Each structure stands twice: as structure tokens, then as C-alpha cells.
């Protein structure tokens, strides 16, 4: 999962790109990067860490130009490190940068093609670099000195023909313009908007609509699955469907966890979707335990708060804030290793004992993935004096790996894999556990957009929408991306803060 942004403006875009990345910071905390273009020169700054730590005033002053793209990284496929920070660059043809959100499922096959047929070299194990080189090769095959929108769209069409998986992409071609496209299932989100100025119309393409709101852009719509967008150097926008076969089947986990509640994703309000999730889950509680003894509903901050509010209202039970969050601890979900996640839970949350003492509490979380966080939080509730501790998950049990851009590569690390709900409840120490039904979750999302006939729900049902994921593939990514493999890969890597890689930046930019 990553966050991407692209702006084609009538004035300098550097500060707006930075503001956009801070608005998208929840989508990736590993690395951040910005590229701008002015008079054919590309200016880049990127490094490991949060956006606020990567960019300094000296960097921003050198990121000149009226068009640019940005990226915040959440590592899934590929290791961590400064070389993996995006946007990524190839100099031929023209000079192209891309920022990518998602995972390719046929990256290994494409790497072989890129080396043997396309005669291109890859520097990293990132599937984003694979995607970039596929696009660059297909654009170069057009053999145009000055590419047009038709050339861009033809290259995107070939990307769709060659690349499987999930990808929401924004890119920049030196001296020619900004482009963006979305995979043919629209798995990862991407929308665009406009802003009218005295100098002309500006366009922005972003992962979440909240960025458009913040920057003063009017949301036009989501980019359709398979659709491509190109804003040329004159500021003219071009749109074209580039996939012969396409279907809108977005990732439902965006609404469960990743997206901000104030965003619209595929014309669905994330906030309203989470309210409906809470209502439907409360109705299930009432079916299963009509004479429940729940005294208080307590959300596990932050993403479960909206669902918990709706649950409390439907159950007729008080809602209380029982956990206070330390805002300076990153998301435990994306931390590598069970030990690190477990340690961070108590650093991140502290119980308000008065809300637990002698009460039967219903804890509400957005989802239960590995179970480490849930187990620690339930124990915290008991330590605070709770009489009984029930656990409600606003999402169904996560039982299958995710291959489309969420860091759930290993089935063996998923607590619900191969276990019943009762067994999960016992393992995490809950007196009772209730999961959302998958159909209720789908209905909660679909109610916001009648055009969506299905969602990408593979982590819940094991049905991989791209049709190219088999047992051998899942075994391979588990071996490469499980917690043990990541820890071995990182053991000799010394973190280095403030690493900046620059094009057309002088040496003082590193100070």
C-alpha cells in the first residue's frame, strides 16, 4: 500500500506536493519522494522516513517546476532501503518517472522478458521498477521524437496486456507532461480533480480524494479501471480507456482500514461505509446474543472508531474512549515482526482504567490480522479491571494472503487461517468474539455505489480476481516476504536517515 500524487499546475507545485504527501502519510511511512520538472530538467528529492523527515527547506527550494509527482512508500514486494524510495526513473525514452501503488503478480516473468527481450537492466527487486521499464519499453517502441497522447495511451494498453496485478500509477515525462493509469480491475484507488486559476486550469491525480479537498481542487471522478490520463505540457487533459477487458472490482480493505474516513473511494464515502459496517455487525450481535450483557463499547483507535460508534447506537449501549493513543508511534500493522508489533502496542495505547473497572466491555477493531495487537489489547483491558472482554471485528476473518499491495503475504502468520472463530477468540484471550459476515461487508460498501458488482475480497475468501494466483505463487511469496525473511534481509542494513538522491540538485541539497 502506498500513496501517490501528481499535479500539473500553472505555478510551482513543490509545496502542494509536500502537503499532499503529508495528507497521504497514513498510506506509507517507510519512504517519501518528490519529482518536479521545469524546462525539461527533472528535480528529485527522496529518502527513507516520513515526509516531514525527508524534505528540508533547501530541498523544497530546488524542487522547481509547475508539474510534479510524489510518493509515500509502504513496502510489500521488494525490500526497504533508499534505492527503493519512489518515484523511480529511467532515462530512455525522454526521461520518465513513475510512482506506483500496488503489486504485480507476474513480476518474475516480466523481469525475464525485460532482460532477454526488452534489453533493459533492473537495479532493484521492486516490481515498481518492472512496471516502469515495461511502460518505457512500450513507449520507446512507438519511435516518436515527440510523443502524443495517442502514444502514451498505446503504451498503457500494452502495459495492461503484459502486467497482471494491482497498479495505480502517476508518472512524469520530461518536457511532455503528466500521466496516470489504473489497472483493469481498479483494485487500488486513483482519482483526479481540477482547479481553475487566472492562469488556467490545474489538474491533480491522487490516491484519495481528501487531498483534493485540502489543496482546493474539485473532484471530477475516479479514474476508471484500465483508463489512462495524460495532461500535456500545454495543460490540456486527455482521457482514454486502454484495456479491452475491464471491470471495477476495488479492494474492500481500503474501506476497512487503509483509507481516511473523509475520503471518497470509487464514489463511496469511507465514513458512511464504516458506519454501515458497524450497524450490520451490531445486528449480528443482536441475532447471536439478544440478551447480551455488554456494558460499554470501546473502539481500538483510530480506524475502528466510526464502526464502534454505529455499533453502540444500534446496541443501545454507551460508547466510551477506553484507550488513549500516543500519536508519535507508527502503525503497528506495518511493523515487521511479531515481537516488534507486540512491544509497540503498549507504547502506542494506554488504558483509561475507569472505563474498564468491573464492566463487561465490547472492544471493536477494524480487523484482526495476525492477532498480536488484539491479544495485547485484551490483556490491557483485563489489567485495567474489566469483568468480561468481548471482541468485535468490523471485517471478516483474514484467512488468506494478500498479493495486491497489502503486507499480508504469509498465510501462516494470519491468526484466522485454518481456525474457527472460537479458536481465534481463545487464542487472543477474548471471552467471546464476533466477526463481520463477508456479505454484510460487501453490502456496506456496495450501498454507496450501485455500479460496483463485486469487490476484491481475496484476504477473506481466497478468490484472487486477476486469475493468475495459484498455490505455488502463494508459497513463493510467503518464502520471500514473511516476517522471518524480512528480518534476515534487514539484519545487515544500518538505517541512514535523511538520504537524498538528487537530479539537477547541487551538493548543498544534502545538507
Image: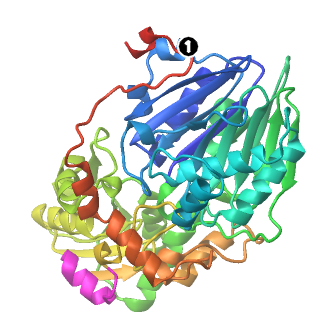
Residue 279, image x and y in percent?
52, 73
Residue at (63, 64) in percent of width and height: 187
Relative height, residue 441 to residue 267 (above, below): below
In the shown orientation, is residue 148 left or right of residue 69? right
Residue 267, image x and y in percent?
72, 58
Residue range corresponding to the magenta coloring: 416-431
Quadrant placement of the C terminus: top left
Decide if residue 218 is in sight here: no
Q: Nearer the viewer, residue 70 or 261?
A: 70
In the shown orientation, is residue 260 left or right of residue 289? right
Helix, strand, or loop for circle 1?
helix
Relative height, residue 233 to residue 332 (above, below): above
Query: Can residue 417 be found in the magenta stretch?
Result: yes
Few, some or many C-alpha atoms within 10 Å of disc 1 (few <14, some 14-19, many ≥20)? some
Residue 269, image x and y in percent?
64, 57
Residue at (79, 35) in percent of width and height: 194
Relative height, residue 460 to residue 43 (above, below): below
Q: Nearer the viewer, residue 277 or 142?
A: 142
The residue pinned by badge 1 equals 62
Residue at (41, 83) in percent of width and height: 285
In the shown orientation, is residue 192 left or right of residue 232? left
Q: Nearer the viewer, residue 38 or 362?
A: 38
Relative height, residue 308 to residue 31 (above, below): below
Residue 325, image x and y in percent?
29, 46
Amino acid at each position: 500500500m502506498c500513496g501517490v500524487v501528481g499535479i500539473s499546475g500553472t505555478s510551482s507545485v513543490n509545496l502542494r506536493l509536500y502537503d499532499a504527501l503529508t495528507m497521504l502519510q497514513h498510506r506509507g511511512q517507510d519512504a517519501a519522494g518528490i519529482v518536479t520538472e521545469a524546462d525539461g530538467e527533472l528535480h528529485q528529492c527522496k529518502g527513507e522516513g516520513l515526509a516531514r523527515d525527508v524534505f528540508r527547506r533547501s530541498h523544497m527550494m530546488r524542487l522547481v517546476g509547475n508539474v510534479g509527482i510524489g510518493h509515500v512508500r509502504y513496502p510489500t514486494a521488494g525490500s526497504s532501503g533508499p534505492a527503493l524510495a519512489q518515484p523511480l526513473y529511467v532515462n530512455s525514452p525522454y526521461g520518465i518517472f513513475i510512482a506506483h501503488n500496488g503489486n504485480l503478480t507476474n513480476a518474475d516473468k516480466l523481469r525475464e522478458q525485460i532482460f532477454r527481450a526488452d534489453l533493459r537492466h533492473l537495479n532493484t527487486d521492486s516490481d515498481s521498477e518492472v512496471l516502469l521499464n515495461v511502460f518505457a519499453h512500450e513507449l520507446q517502441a512507438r519511435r516518436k521524437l515527440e510523443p502524443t497522447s495517442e502514444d502514451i495511451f498505446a503504451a498503457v494498453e500494452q502495459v495492461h496486456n503484459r502486467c497482471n496485478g494491482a497498479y495505480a500509477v502517476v508518472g512524469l515525462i520530461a518536457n511532455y507532461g503528466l500521466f496516470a493509469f489504473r489497472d483493469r480491475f481498479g483494485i487500488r484507488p486513483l482519482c483526479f480533480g481540477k482547479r481553475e486559476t487566472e492562469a488556467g486550469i490545474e489538474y491533480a491525480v491522487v490516491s484519495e480524494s481528501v487531498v483534493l479537498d485540502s489543496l482546493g481542487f474539485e473532484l471530477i471522478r475516479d479514474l476508471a479501471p484500465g483508463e489512462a490520463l495524460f495532461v500535456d505540457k500545454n495543460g490540456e487533459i486527455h482521457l482514454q480507456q486502454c484495456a479491452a477487458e475491464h471491470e471495477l472490482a476495488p479492494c474492500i480493505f481500503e474501506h476497512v482500514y487503509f483509507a481516511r474516513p473523509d475520503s471518497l473511494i470509487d464514489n463511496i464515502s469511507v465514513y458512511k461505509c464504516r458506519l454501515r459496517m458497524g450497524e450490520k455487525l451490531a445486528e449480528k450481535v443482536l441475532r447471536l446474543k439478544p440478551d447480551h450483557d455488554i456494558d460499554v463499547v470501546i473502539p481500538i483507535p483510530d480506524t475502528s472508531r466510526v464502526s464502534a460508534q454505529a455499533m453502540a447506537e444500534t446496541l443501545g449501549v454507551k460508547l466510551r474512549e477506553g484507550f488513549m493513543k500516543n500519536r508519535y508511534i507508527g502503525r503497528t500493522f506495518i511493523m515487521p515482526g511479531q515481537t516488534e508489533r507486540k512491544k509497540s502496542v503498549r507504547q502506542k495505547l494506554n488504558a483509561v482504567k475507569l472505563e474498564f473497572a468491573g464492566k463487561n466491555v465490547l472492544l471493536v477493531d477494524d480487523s484482526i490480522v495476525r492477532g498480536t495487537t488484539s491479544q495485547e489489547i485484551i490483556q490491557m483491558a483485563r489489567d485495567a479491571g474489566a469483568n468480561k472482554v468481548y471482541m468485535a471485528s468490523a471485517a471478516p476473518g483474514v484467512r488468506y494472503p494478500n498479493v495486491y499491495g497489502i503486507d499480508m503475504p504469509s498465510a501462516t502468520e494470519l491468526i484466522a487461517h485454518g481456525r474457527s472463530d472460537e479458536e481465534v477468540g481463545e487464542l487472543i484471550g477474548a471471552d467471546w468474539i464476533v466477526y463481520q459476515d463477508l456479505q454484510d461487508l460487501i453490502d456496506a460498501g456496495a450501498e454507496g455505489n450501485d455500479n460496483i458488482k463485486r469487490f476484491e475480497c481475496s484476504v477473506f475468501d481466497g478468490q484472487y480476481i486477476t486469475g493468475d494466483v495459484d498455490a505455488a505463487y502463494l508459497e513463493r511469496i510467503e518464502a520471500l516476504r514473511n516476517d522471518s525473511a524480512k528480518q534476515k534481509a534487514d539484519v545487515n542494513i544500518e538505517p541512514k536517515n535523511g538520504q537524498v538522491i538528487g537530479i539537477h540538485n547541487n551538493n548543498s541539497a544534502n545538507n
